[in-house]
């Protein structure tokens, strides 16, 4: 499990110039993301983000948010990439939320289950989503250019989504919680290097996607202070 700490920014021509001078471009790739939730937003209202990218599942789980200025501008999420763990965590989150569908479905799901390697029951790819009433609520394609800042090895991504929004992010991945503070410091340093002076939180691709295509979902998340 790793923790992703990141700060989003708008990449101006000026930022791009600095980036080209102080960073190495490590490549460009394109990926298609699908995000899943229940009809009542049971996952995202608790700040859990279930995603399928290039055939791989990921669950981003919230961590306590810090109060300082730098922490307000940064997000941190624990990332789970093992499908068995994802399914277990999603079930727990939905149960905590008292999802009525989950209680009902768990009575009937047994016939679709297969036994996992450590005697855990894991449903197959197709069935677990419908068992938990999870449906795709957002999908989009991103073209990403990635850079590594020369001295500190911090990664900077410039994303262009296919619904007309571009955003940059400075990202540090750590494996231990105790390293989050140093990740925040690295991000702060990188932000200064890139000349990011603004103190405003920049919307991510999801903010803009939901606002544009599913405003009810967007409003619910805004009301719950998730976005
Ligand atoms: C955590 C989250 C979402 C899931 C993924 O968001 P993000 O990291 O922005 O996407 P992407 O494509 O850069 O993923 P990566 O390749 O880095 O894994 S969607 C919404 N959130 C919550 C959230 C938030 N509350 N505030 C901000 C600024 N961003 C995201």
Image (cartoon, rainbow, N blue to C red):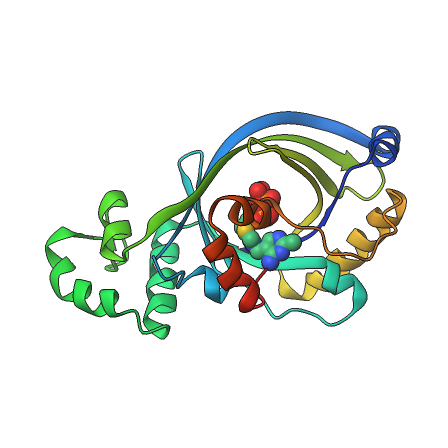
Against 137, residue 107 (above or below) is below
Taking 62 as reference, is 73 left or right?
right
Q: Position of residue 99 (x, y in %)?
A: 30, 69
Taking 166 as reference, is 125 left or right?
left
How many numbered callouts? 0
- Which residue occupies the foreground of this view, 198 or 220? 220
Q: Residue at x 68, y 66 (%)?
A: 178
Q: Residue at x 59, y 44 (%)?
A: 205
Task: Using the rendered image of the protein, determine whether residue 3 is visible from the camera's viewpoint.
Answer: no
Task: Using the rendered image of the protein, determine whether residue 165 is visible from the camera's viewpoint.
Answer: yes
Quadrant location of the C terminus in the rendered image: bottom right
Against 8, residue 149 (above or below) is above
- Which residue occupies the foreground of this view, 189 or 215? 215
Q: Position of residue 84 (x, y in %)?
A: 34, 54
Taking 145 as reference, is 223 left or right?
left
Q: Give the quarter of the image for residue 13.
A: top right
């Amino acid at each position: 499990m790793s923790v992703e700490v990141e700060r989003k920014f708008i990449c101006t021509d000026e930022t791009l110039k600095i980036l080209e001078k102080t960073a190495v471009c490590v490549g460009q790739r394109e990926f298609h993301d699908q995000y899943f939730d229940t009809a009542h937003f049971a996952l995202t209202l608790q700040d859990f983000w279930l995603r399928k990218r290039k055939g791989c599942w990921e669950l981003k789980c919230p961590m306590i948010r810090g109060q300082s200025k730098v922490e307000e501008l940064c997000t941190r999420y624990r990332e789970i990439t093992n499908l068995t763990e994802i399914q277990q965590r999603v079930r727990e989150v939905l149960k905590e939320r008292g999802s009525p569908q989950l209680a009902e479905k768990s009575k009937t799901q047994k016939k679709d289950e297969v036994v996992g390697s450590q005697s855990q029951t894991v449903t197959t790819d197709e069935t677990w989503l419908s068992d938990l009433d999870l449906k795709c609520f957002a999908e989009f394609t991103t073209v990403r250019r990635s850079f590594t800042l020369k001295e500190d090895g911090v990664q900077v991504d410039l994303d262009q989504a296919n619904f007309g929004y571009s955003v940059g992010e400075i990202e540090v991945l750590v494996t231990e919680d105790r390293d989050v503070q140093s990740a925040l410091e690295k991000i702060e340093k990188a932000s200064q290097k890139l000349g990011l002076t603004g103190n405003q939180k920049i919307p991510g691709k999801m903010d803009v996607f939901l606002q544009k295509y599913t405003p009810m979902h967007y409003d619910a998340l805004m009301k719950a202070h998730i976005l």
